[in-house]
Image (cartoon, rainbow, N blue to C red):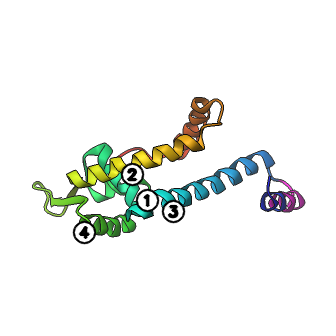
């Protein structure tokens, strides 16, 4: 436990009435998520000219083949406003292509280009190597993942 967490715990104990186990889990999870995303962006995504949001959009498109921007936002966890900017950047790099829906010209379908698919696979190889190193000493990784998945399900919206 570092000084920040110790100080936070002391303040909460002083204020009274808080579940300290829940606080500890939430505090560590939030800080871990922030550190992990910063690490990935700094070491994997940015050196390849892509933001973490851009990576998440590329990965989501790679999984689904083709999506509308609003579906992408929901599935990738990137805001709808941010998706618009990310798509402009990715399109400028030749990694995605947009096409108006034949059925409804107001809607846009987005898909990866072959270059976008290759870039995503290369980036994910690098990211997976980092993931493997990060989790190398974690015993019971499958069980840990299931616990995280249960938490995620409690917070999740249904897929589009």
On the rendered structure, is 89 left or right of 104?
Answer: right
Residue at 23% of width from left, 56% of height from top? 110
Nearer-N-terminus badge (4/3): 3
Foreground disc of the pair 1, 4: 1
- Helix, strand or loop at disc 3? helix
Corner quadrant of residue 46: bottom left
Name the magenta segment's main secondary structure: helix
Q: Which mark is residue 92?
A: 4
Q: In the rendered image, is residue 75 in sight?
A: no
Estimate the x, y position of residue 117 in percent, counting from the top left: 27, 49
3D distance between C-alphas at marks 1 and 4: 17 Å
Residue 120 is one of the magenta-drawn residues: no
Q: Is residue 14 above or below residue 122?
A: below
Residue topped by disc 2:
123
3D distance between C-alphas at marks 1 and 3: 7 Å
Nearer-N-terminus badge (2/1): 1
Query: Do residues under tags 1 and 4 come within 8 Å of each other at their CB atoms?
Result: no
Estimate the x, y position of residue 18 in percent, counting from the top left: 80, 53
- Helix, strand or loop at disc 4? helix
Residue topped by disc 1:
45
Residue 10 is one of the magenta-drawn residues: yes
Nearer-N-terminus badge (1/4): 1
Estimate the x, y position of residue 89 in percent, counting from the top left: 30, 68
- Which residue range is magenta in the image? 8-17
Query: Do residues under tags 2 and 3 come within 8 Å of each other at their CB atoms?
Result: no
Q: Is residue 53 above or below residue 132?
A: below
């Amino acid at each position: 436990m570092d000084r920040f967490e110790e100080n936070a715990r002391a303040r909460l104990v002083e204020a009274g009435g808080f579940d300290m186990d829940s606080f500890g889990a939430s505090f560590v999870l939030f800080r871990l998520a922030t550190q992990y995303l910063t690490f990935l962006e700094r070491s994997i995504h940015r050196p390849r000219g892509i933001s973490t949001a851009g990576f998440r959009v590329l990965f989501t498109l790679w999984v689904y083949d083709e999506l509308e921007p609003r579906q992408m936002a929901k599935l990738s966890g990137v805001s709808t406003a941010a998706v618009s900017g990310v798509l402009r950047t990715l399109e400028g790099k030749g990694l995605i292509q947009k096409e108006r829906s034949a059925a409804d010209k107001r809607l846009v379908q987005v898909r990866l280009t072959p270059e976008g698919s290759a870039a995503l696979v290369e980036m994910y190889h690098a990211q997976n190597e980092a993931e493997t190193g990060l989790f190398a000493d974690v015993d019971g990784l499958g069980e840990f993942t299931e616990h995280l998945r249960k938490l995620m399900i409690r917070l999740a919206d249904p897929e589009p």
